[in-house]
Amino acid sequence: MYSADIKKISRHFLPTDFTVTDWSALEPYFKELLDRDISSKEKLEQWLKDQGELEAVVNEDFCWRQIKMTCDTENKELENAFNYFCLEIQPKIQPYSDALNKKMLASPALPELDQEKYFTYLRGIKKSIELFREENIPLQAEMAVLQQQFGQITGAMMVTVNGQEYTLQQAGKFLESHDRKLREEVYMKIVQRRMEDKEKLDELYDKLISIRNTEAKNAGFNNYRDYRFKELGRFDYTKEDCFKFHDAVKQHVLPIVNKIHERRKKALGVDSLRPWDIEAEPAGTEPLHPFKTGDELLEKSVACFKKLRPFFGDCLEKMRTMHHLDLESRKGKAPGGYNCPLAESGAPFIFMNASGQMHDVTTMVHEGGHAVHSFLAHHLELNGFKEYPMEIAEVASMAMELFSMDQWETFFSNEEDLKRAKIHQLERVITIFPWIAIIDKFQHWVYEHPAHNHEERTAAWTNILNEFKDDVIDYSGLDLFRSYAWQRQLHLYEVPFYYIEYGIAQLGAIGMWMQYKENKEHALDNYCKALSLGGTKTLPELYKAAGLEFDFSPGKIKVLMDFVNAEMEKSL
């Protein structure tokens, strides 16, 4: 039914050989759309298609500039190309986008459109008009450039272990070593290296908070949090729902986290469990080695996905033929991992920092789930229809982590290793929740108190961190390093308030996995059906299409946590 034989969108409005170079070459197409007659339904629908084509071309050009820059943060030419778009092209597009939005809503043919088909699209357009302010254009351009500095600063961070230099991601593999002294040494080197750039990252965050606060005030909001909720299209839940989520994590998740850490402490046979012990295996048990190179990771991921459903593996293979993957960690590469949809090409780009560890497998199948989502939504008629909410996008990725576990023998030929890998995944499903709550709650505080100083920010962070602290790990002597641990979370810099989505979606993913346990094919059908809708339905409707309820209340969280805990207990 679904095919990965994705085709680049045919151009009908722009010349086939057109590329984005500068504003003078691009502006005539915006002008033509602005001047065109859209008084009939047929003319309006064609206009929307042409506008979508222009958006796809521009968006993809921007994405490639960002991808290339994150793959090589030390290349000044790539940085300049990205900055040029942010400072010289995007600011000139924004007034046209606002004018085009208003033109569409003023069209006499608008009521003739299928209102159900266009509901979420038009809702998003109205929201954009409400938020648009001319004076925010230069602020947004400045922010786009500043946000990328996080990757440049952190991408340059290296540590030396046993006489060899490693990125922080690569050094993380030593935290799995049997040698506790080595683990502690590497852990301390990593946090001390981060500390060297603490002031730089503090100052960068200060600038971003100030600009974001001004942006919100310009648009008539009391604070950036309320502005950002609207900008992110959070039509279906409120800040109060987020606060309930925080409380539910303390009540229903932390007790399970304590049990997981107690098991780890007992298995390692240590008197106190330290932060550098969390990834370690007991003596005599080798750390999991699911792959050695990025090519091997990809090969095994394709095999894993094909076993789950051939279409999933075909998606990764298509990306491989298009060279849409950069998987291995190296110096000068930005940290983290992402799947970047490419609006015109259709096949997205996966970026990550693999170093041969178990969590790299999780990242790969996670980003692979996002990639499948991009393939499934590519057929949709308008570019705007493909802009799906992040709360369903993360279900695509997190459910794939859980679905794929049944096929992880492609990574682990040894039955015992496979069992350990699955336990590791289920532990991670649970232990990520407190961090999600911490990061989300911290952001609420930051933007409710935008005039805070560094001491106040550190105090607020430390209080929130301790609020969600487990009862097992011994953090003594590490207060200084813990006081700026928030600086490692790129979302705070690059995509503010985008983090609660992981918690909401993790619950959705667990719900999908419950379905999968009952009827594998039915669950995968629901998964594909929901993702193929893109952003054409509301969030609750997308969840319903997946066979889920859009519900992250404390009661629902308890049910899902109990289910994962029971599955984990079975595996022990």
Image: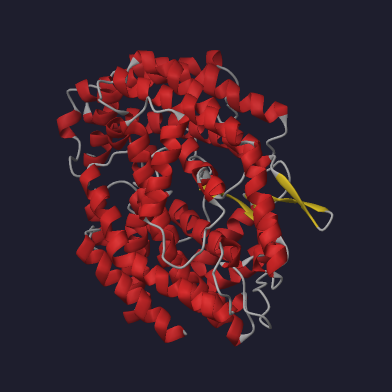
User: Looking at the image, which residue sits at the far left?
Assistant: 111
- Left or right, residue 436 beside residue 337: left
Q: Picture coordinates of residue 280 (x, y %)? A: 61, 71
Picture quadrant of residue 458: top left
Q: Determine whether 554 is above or below 93 in the image.
A: below
Picture quadrant of residue 373: bottom left
Q: Nearer the viewer, residue 111 or 244?
A: 244
Q: Picture coordinates of residue 479 (x, y %)? A: 52, 49
Residue at the location (42% across, 43% down)?
Answer: 461
- Left or right, residue 70 beside residue 566: right
Q: Determine whether 61 is above or below 186 in the image.
A: above
Q: Nearer the viewer, residue 172 or 89?
A: 172
Q: Picture coordinates of residue 367 (x, y %)? A: 52, 56
Q: Determine whether 406 is above or below 123 in the image.
A: below
Residue at the location (41% across, 37% down)?
Answer: 496
Q: Picture coordinates of residue 80 (x, y %)? A: 65, 24
- Tell me if I can see residue 318 in this picture: yes
- Colouring convention used in this rendered image of the protein: secondary structure
Q: Nearer the viewer, residue 167 or 510?
A: 167
